Image: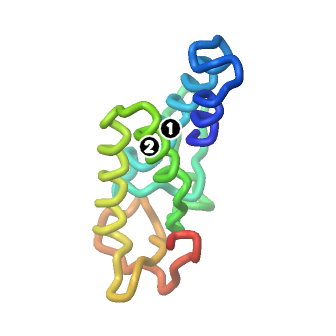
Amino acid sequence: PGVLALGAYTDPQGLQSTRAQRDLDLAKALAYTCYQMYERTATKLAPEFITFRAGHDFIPAPSAPFNILRPETAESLFVLHHLTGDPMYREWAWNIFQAFESHCKTNLGYGAHPDVRDSKKRTPDDRMESFFL
């Protein structure tokens, strides 16, 4: 969503153009969905991916309930906050950071969380992806 928002703000036709406003609205909607992937789990950490079920809310995919510290949502929230000035994006990012602190922090860094559906204190995996740095 962040790159889409950047595209809207740098649209050659201007930010007020129909295309730029469409892209910005889509970026905001996608960012909301990304944030909800965090907000709607027991740990407030997003799973690797989710499953959309007709007539039901989305759920963590049974084959991928883990969180490997992907930064894309935080990056998009950073971009949207700086472009729009809306403090909501900063608050969402802070909530995500607090979840990482609560469930993924180790003595030497951060580890992947094995199951975002489990709110009990679980030990993070003994690995940290390089993209988390």
Q: Is residue 47 left or right of residue 11?
A: left
Q: Which class describes the residues within 10 Å of circle 2: few (<14), some (14-19), or many (20+)?
A: many
Kind of element beneath mark 2: helix
Q: Residue 26's spot in the image, x, y percent?
A: 59, 26
Q: What residue is shown with label 1? A: 31
Q: Residue at x 39, y 45 (%)?
A: 40
Q: Which class describes the residues within 10 Å of circle 1: few (<14), some (14-19), or many (20+)?
A: many
Along the viewing direction, whichever of 82 and 113 lies nearer the viewer: 82
Above-or-below relation of 132 to 56: below
Kind of element beneath mark 1: helix
Q: Quadrant of the N terminus?
A: top right
Along the viewing direction, whichever of 10 and 63 lies nearer the viewer: 10
Q: Is residue 32 left or right of residue 48?
A: left
| Figure coloring | rainbow
Q: Are marks 2 and 1 in contact (CB under 8 Å)?
A: yes
Above-or-below relation of 10 to 114: above
Q: Which amino acid is tagged 1?
A: Ala
Q: Residue at x 46, y 35 (%)?
A: 83
Q: Which amino acid is tagged 2?
A: Tyr
Q: What residue is shown with label 2? A: 35
Q: Is residue 85 left or right of residue 16?
A: left
Q: Residue at x 63, y 25 (%)?
A: 23
Along the viewing direction, whichever of 71 and 120 lies nearer the viewer: 71
Q: Residue 108's spot in the image, x, y percent?
A: 37, 88
Residue found farthest to the right: 12
Q: Residue 90's spot in the image, x, y percent?
A: 34, 44
Q: Residue at x 42, y 40 (%)?
A: 82
The number of discs equals 2
Q: Residue 54's spot in the image, x, y percent?
A: 61, 29
- Distance from Cα at disc 2 to Cα at disc 1: 6 Å
Q: Quadrant of residue 104?
A: bottom left
Q: Which mark is residue 112?
A: none
